[in-house]
Image (cartoon, rainbow, N blue to C red):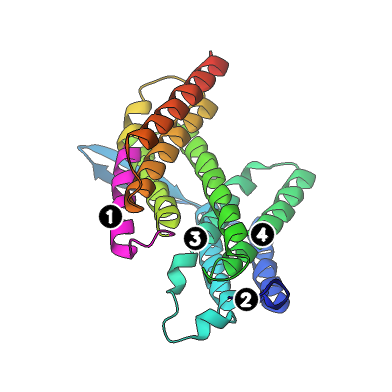
C-alpha cells in the first residue's frame, strides 16, 4: 500500500501532450471543410440514411486519441509495470466517452467565445478523468477510494448527458435504442468491474443492464416528454439496474436492499414527474 506522501502521480508531460492533441484536433477540423457523403441502408424493412461529415471524423478521432493518450499516461504507473497488471482497455470507457461527448457538443456551440470555452472545459474535464483513472489503477493504494468515488460520479454524469442527447434526437428507435444500449454497456461495465466478481461476470451483468436500457429507450420514444425528463428517467433506471446488479455481484442483495432501492426509485420518480409536469 502506498502512503499518502509516496502516492504515484501522472507524468505531467504525457498528460499535457494528451490534452494538447485533444484540444488541437477540433481546432484543425474547425477550419477544414470535408465534403459530406450520404449513405443509405435498409433496416427492418425501411431505409435508414446518415450523412458522413467532419463531425463524424471528430467523433472518431477524439475518442481514439483519448484512449491511446490514457494508455501512455497510465503506462508509467508502478502497478502497470508488474507482470499481472490490469488490461489497459479497462481504463478506456470514461476518457473515450468524455472525448466523444465533447466531439458531439462542440459543433453545437456556434458563437466563437462559447466554442472556445467549451473546448477549454473539455480539456479540463478530460484531465480530471485521466488523473482519477491514474489514482484508481491500484486498489490497494491510499487514494483509490477517493479516485473510485470520483470516477463513479463522472460515470453517472456522462450517462445523464448521453441519454439526454440521444433522446433529444427523436430519430428512429432503432438508432436511439442501439445508442443507449452501447453507452449503457460501456458505463455499466465501468461501474460493475470494480467488484471482485471478475471481468466475465461483470461483463455479463453489464450486458443485461444494457439490454434493459435499450428496450426502455425504445419504449420511451413513444412518450412525448422533454429531453431532460427522458434523460433523467433513463438515468434513474440505469442507476437502479446497476446498483441492484452490483449488490448481487457483491452477494449483498436482500429484501432490505431491494426496499431501499424501491424507496429511492419512488422518490426520484415523483420528483422527476413533478418538475416535468
Question: What whole-number distance in Å separates the C-alpha atoms at marks 3 and 4?
Answer: 21 Å
Give the residue pinned by disc 1.
Answer: 204
Question: What whole-number distance in Å separates the C-alpha atoms at marks 3 and 2?
Answer: 37 Å
Left or right: 207 with respect to 148? left
Give the residue pinned by disc 2.
Answer: 2
Mark 4 vs 2, N-terminal side: 2
Mark 1 vs 3, N-terminal side: 3
- Residue at the extreme top of the image, as rendered: 277
- The span shown in magenta is 194-214
Residue 38 visible in this rendered orientation of the protein: no
Q: Are marks 3 and 4 in contact (CB under 8 Å)?
A: no
Question: What whole-number distance in Å separates the C-alpha atoms at marks 1 and 3?
Answer: 26 Å
Give the residue pinned by disc 4.
Answer: 128
Task: Choose mark 2 or mark 1, whichever is in front.
Answer: 2
x%, y% of residue 207?
30, 51
Q: Is residue 37 above or below residue 170?
A: below
User: What residue appears at the point 31 percent right and 39 percent down from the top-left corner?
Assistant: 212
Mark 1 crowdedness (10 Å alpha carbons): few <14, some 14-19, many ≥20: few
Classify mark 3: helix, strand or loop.
helix
Mark 3 vs 4, N-terminal side: 3
Task: Choose mark 3 or mark 4, whichever is in front.
Answer: 4
User: What residue appears at the point 54 percent right and 46 percent down from the top-left corner?
Assistant: 158
x%, y% of residue 272?
52, 22
Q: Are marks 1 and 4 in contact (CB under 8 Å)?
A: no
Q: Are marks 4 and 2 in contact (CB under 8 Å)?
A: no
Residue 50 visible in this rendered orientation of the protein: yes
Task: Choose mark 3 or mark 2, whichever is in front.
Answer: 2
Amino acid at each position: 500500500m502506498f502512503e499518502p506522501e509516496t502516492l504515484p502521480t501522472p507524468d505531467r508531460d504525457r498528460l499535457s501532450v494528451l490534452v494538447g492533441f485533444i484540444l488541437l484536433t477540433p481546432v484543425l477540423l474547425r477550419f477544414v471543410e470535408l465534403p459530406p457523403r450520404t449513405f443509405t441502408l435498409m433496416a427492418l424493412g425501411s431505409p435508414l440514411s446518415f450523412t458522413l461529415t467532419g463531425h463524424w471524423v471528430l467523433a472518431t478521432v477524439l475518442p481514439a486519441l483519448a484512449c491511446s493518450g490514457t494508455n501512455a499516461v497510465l503506462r508509467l504507473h508502478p502497478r502497470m509495470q508488474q507482470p499481472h497488471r490490469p488490461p489497459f482497455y479497462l481504463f478506456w470507457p470514461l476518457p473515450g466517452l468524455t472525448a466523444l461527448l465533447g466531439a458531439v457538443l462542440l459543433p453545437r456551440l456556434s458563437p466563437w467565445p462559447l466554442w472556445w470555452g467549451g473546448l477549454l472545459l473539455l480539456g479540463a474535464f478530460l484531465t480530471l478523468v485521466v488523473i482519477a483513472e491514474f489514482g484508481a489503477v491500484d486498489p490497494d493504494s491510499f487514494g483509490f477510494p477517493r479516485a473510485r468515488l470520483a470516477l463513479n460520479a463522472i460515470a453517472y454524469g456522462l450517462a445523464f448527458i448521453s441519454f439526454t442527447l440521444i433522446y433529444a434526437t427523436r430519430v428512429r428507435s432503432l438508432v436511439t435504442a442501439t445508442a443507449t444500449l452501447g453507452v449503457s454497456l460501456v458505463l455499466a461495465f465501468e461501474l460493475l468491474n470494480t467488484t471482485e466478481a471478475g471481468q466475465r461476470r461483470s461483463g455479463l451483468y453489464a450486458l443485461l443492464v444494457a439490454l434493459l436500457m435499450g428496450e426502455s429507450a425504445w419504449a420511451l420514444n413513444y412518450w412525448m416528454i422533454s429531453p431532460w425528463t427522458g434523460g433523467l428517467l433513463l438515468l434513474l433506471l440505469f442507476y437502479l439496474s446497476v446498483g441492484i446488479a452490483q449488490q448481487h455481484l457483491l452477494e449483498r442483495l436482500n429484501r432490505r436492499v431491494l426496499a431501499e432501492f424501491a424507496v429511492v426509485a419512488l422518490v426520484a420518480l415523483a420528483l422527476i414527474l413533478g418538475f416535468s409536469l
